Image: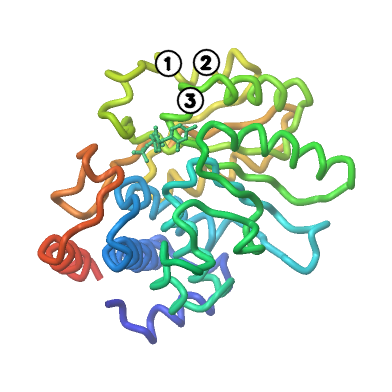
């Protein structure tokens, strides 16, 4: 487990002063949360969530300006690939949106932390998801709504590479560009893996950056495990240039749990007791 004092002191810092090594410390805490949540629930999706931990640590600790009481100035974060929600819940709890203990109710009957996120149960969320391919369309509607109401925040939407095989993603991509929504930034969980294997084998996406660019988006690729690259991509995304922006975050499914890395099996399997203990030991060694 992380040193509670150290973890607390990072969270209490002015976000501008949080260093990359402190982000890595928090991302590792998020990874231990994910493994524990999925283990206790005996179901869930650890692989994608672990791959996204560095991006989410940066997003929630450095990038997002959330203000639930003042929607007119608040940023928004929408998640489209809802099955990876363990990372979203762990991040929300880290920044104080609900108590940490609630994480251990993940996927249990009556829990607010459903296996796929629902605003019905958890109103702190900006969207519900789980039925894949809908998030970019939700972002299109939400982005237009923000514009109509003169809201000043930025809208971030996380989607997956598997979802780029779905038609609705491309209808939404066309619409967001058509309406010149430069207050919208999408990012792709580009781990090249989906439920049935490698994305390139199941349904090759070709050159994803070129595809989005031909739909009118400004695109950029970055490592999802290098904090300098993650933060500079998010910085770039904030500059308004009349077009929506998308970041392709190359990352490793199952990152930092050796037996899960790059293995499609861990898209949606919980660890057994022995695997749980091995995973936690590996993560402990990184604090
Ligand atoms: C509309 C819809 N079709 C199928 C599914 C079942 N499903 C759940 S996850 C998944 C694979 C999605 O790929 P990706 O998000 O790239 O997976 P990951 O990187 O998390 O392994 C599928 C097909 C779903 N949730 N929604």
Q: Is mark 3 within 8 Å of ligand 1?
A: no
- The extreme bottom residue here reads 5
User: Where does ligand 1 appear, by image quarter?
Assistant: top left
Identity of the residue drawn at 49% across and 68% down: 111
Asked whether the beta carbons under mark 2 and mark 1 sit within 8 Å of each other, the answer is yes
Q: Check disc 2 and report the residue beneath it.
A: 211
Residue 71, given in percent of the width and then of the height, sits at: 79, 59
C-alpha separation, residue under disc 1 versus residue under disc 3: 11 Å
Identity of the residue drawn at 62% across and 16% down: 215
Q: Quadrant of residue 75?
A: bottom right
Examine the rendered structure and indicate whether residue 133 appears above or below residue 20.
Answer: above
Under circle 1, the secondary element is: loop
Examine the rendered structure and indicate whether residue 242 appears above or below residue 204.
Answer: below
First in sequence: mark 1 vs mark 3? 3
Q: Check disc 3 and report the residue beneath it.
A: 164
First in sequence: mark 3 vs mark 2? 3
Quadrant for the N terminus, please.
Answer: bottom left
Identity of the residue drawn at 67% across and 19% down: 174
Residue 156, given in percent of the width and then of the height, sits at: 62, 45
**Left or right: 187, with 251 as reference point:** right
85, 29: nearer the viewer:
85
Under circle 3, the secondary element is: helix
Residue 21, given in percent of the width and then of the height, sits at: 36, 64
Residue 101, given in percent of the width and then of the height, sits at: 43, 79
Q: Is mark 2 within 8 Å of ligand 1?
A: no
92, 270: nearer the viewer:
270
Using a 10 Å C-alpha cutoff, classify the residue at mark 2 as few (fewer than 14 neighbours), some (14 to 19) or many (20 or more): some
Quadrant for the C terminus, please.
Answer: bottom left
Using a 10 Å C-alpha cutoff, classify the residue at mark 3 as few (fewer than 14 neighbours), some (14 to 19) or many (20 or more): some
Asked whether the beta carbons under mark 3 and mark 2 sit within 8 Å of each other, the answer is yes
For residue 207, the mark is: 1
Examine the rendered structure and indicate whether residue 82 appears above or below residue 115.
Answer: above
């Amino acid at each position: 487990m992380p040193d509670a004092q150290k973890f607390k002191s990072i969270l209490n810092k002015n976000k501008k002063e949080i260093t990359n090594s402190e982000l890595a410390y928090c991302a590792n805490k998020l990874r231990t949360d994910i493994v524990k949540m999925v283990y206790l629930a005996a179901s869930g999706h650890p692989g994608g969530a672990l791959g996204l931990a560095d991006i989410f640590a940066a997003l929630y600790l450095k990038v997002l300006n959330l203000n639930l009481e003042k929607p007119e100035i608040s940023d928004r974060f929408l998640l489209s690939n809802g099955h990876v929600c363990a990372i979203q819940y762990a991040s929300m709890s880290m920044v104080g949106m609900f108590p940490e203990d609630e994480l251990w109710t993940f996927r249990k009957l009556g829990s607010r932390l459903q296996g796929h996120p629902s605003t019905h149960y958890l109103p702190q969320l900006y969207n519900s998801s789980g039925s894949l391919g809908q998030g970019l369309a939700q972002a299109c509607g939400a982005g237009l709504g923000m514009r109509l109401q003169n809201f000043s925040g930025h809208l971030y939407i996380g989607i997956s590479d598997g979802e780029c095989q779905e038609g609705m993603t491309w209808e939404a991509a066309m619409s967001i560009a058509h309406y010149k929504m430069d207050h919208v930034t999408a990012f792709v969980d580009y781990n090249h893996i989906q439920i049935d294997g490698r994305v390139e084998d199941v349904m090759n996406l070709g050159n994803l950056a070129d595809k989005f660019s031909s739909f009118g988006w400004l695109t950029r690729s970055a490592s999802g495990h290098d904090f300098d690259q993650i933060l500079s991509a998010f910085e770039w995304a904030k500059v308004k240039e009349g077009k929506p922006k998308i970041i392709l975050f190359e990352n490793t499914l199952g990152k930092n749990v050796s037996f899960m890395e790059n293995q499609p099996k861990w898209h949606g399997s919980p660890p057994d007791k022995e695997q749980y203990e091995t995973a936690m030991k590996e993560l402990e060694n990184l604090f």
